[in-house]
Image (spheres, helix red, strand yellow):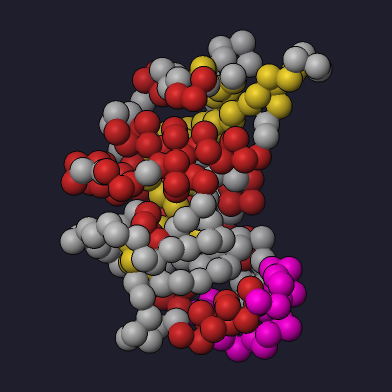
Amino acid sequence: MITIISPTTTMNFDKNININIYSKPYFSDESNYLMSLLKSLNISEVKNLMNLSDDLATLNLSRYKNYGSSTNPKYQSILAFDGEVFSCMNTSNFTDDDFNFTNNHLRILSGLYGVLSPLDLIEPYRLEMKAKLTNNEGSNLYKFWKPKITNFLIKELSKHDNKILLNLASSEYVKAIDLKILGESCKFVNVEFKEYNDKTDKFRVIGMYSKQARGHMARFIIKNKIDNLEDLKSFNLNGYKYNEDLSTDTDFIFTR
């Protein structure tokens, strides 16, 4: 079983966590090509590409220009990304066994790198999957990445006994996978976290809480070496419980 998560738009290369092992992103050639396109943009084009403020556009244009330089910082992807999911995953006390399990069972989808293993070294960047960056495959990143990411994940899952792709990523990134083709050889299971509203007597997804829960579940999977769906149902952190009434074979709903 492989769990997928989204990257974050914020990154932190100053964490006091050192891992001696690292790897090279599988789609390095593709990311270098996309970066060559980004380097050719001006500040206004960067701003419009991802609807950024002037300050963020300036920051990211600088990142593009510095990408690939020998002095540019590099960090394992699971450490470089910041934000709610990664904060709640809390890698600060991961053991070597935890990192090894993570590297075999977790993948991070990325607009620049396609798919990242947790120990892949990456550089500072921002490129959202939904960005309409014209490339040699079409007018957006979905056309560029979908067949590549889909085939990669199928190949990765072929090495696992349980050929299950567990989704803890956002819809923006799941759209970069051809679920129909993936479903021919693997099982796709989506996970959602919902909050009960006593005024409406209904459960609904709240973005911030959902992001936090995804991070907690990722940590739960890693720390407990979860590799099947039945054990996943025992997740009960922060008041969440598996809701059998709302769940299906391919949609696992946890509520509180």
Q: How many marks?
A: 0
Is residue 231 covered in magenta?
no
Q: Is residue 232 above or below residue 100?
A: above
Q: Residue at x 67, y 34 (%)?
A: 206
Q: Is residue 53 above or below residue 235?
A: below
Q: Position of 90 compared to 209: left or right?
A: left
Residue 212 at x, y percent in the picture: 53, 38
Is residue 51 covered in magenta?
yes
Q: Pick the residue in front: 246 or 157.
A: 246
Residue 89 at x, y percent in the picture: 40, 42
Furthest residue toward right: 200
Within the image, what quadrant is residue 198 found in? top right
Within the image, what quadrant is residue 140 found in? bottom right
Q: Position of 134 compared to 146: left or right?
A: right
Residue 131 at x, y percent in the picture: 67, 66
Magenta span dominant secondary structure: helix
Q: Pick the residue in front: 205 or 188.
A: 205
Q: Is residue 227 above or below residue 99?
A: above
Q: Which residues are magenta?
A: 33-55
Q: Pick the residue in front: 201 or 153.
A: 201
Q: Residue at x 73, y 83 (%)?
A: 44
Q: Residue at x 23, y 46 (%)?
A: 100
* Res 127 visible: yes
Q: Quadrant of the C terminus?
A: top right
Q: Position of 185 compared to 95: left or right?
A: right
Q: Residue at x 56, y 61 (%)?
A: 9
Q: Position of 239 compared to 47: left or right?
A: left
Q: Quadrant of the N terminus?
A: top left
Q: Is residue 95 above or below residue 59?
A: above
Furthest residue toward top: 245
Residue 157 at x, y percent in the picture: 37, 42
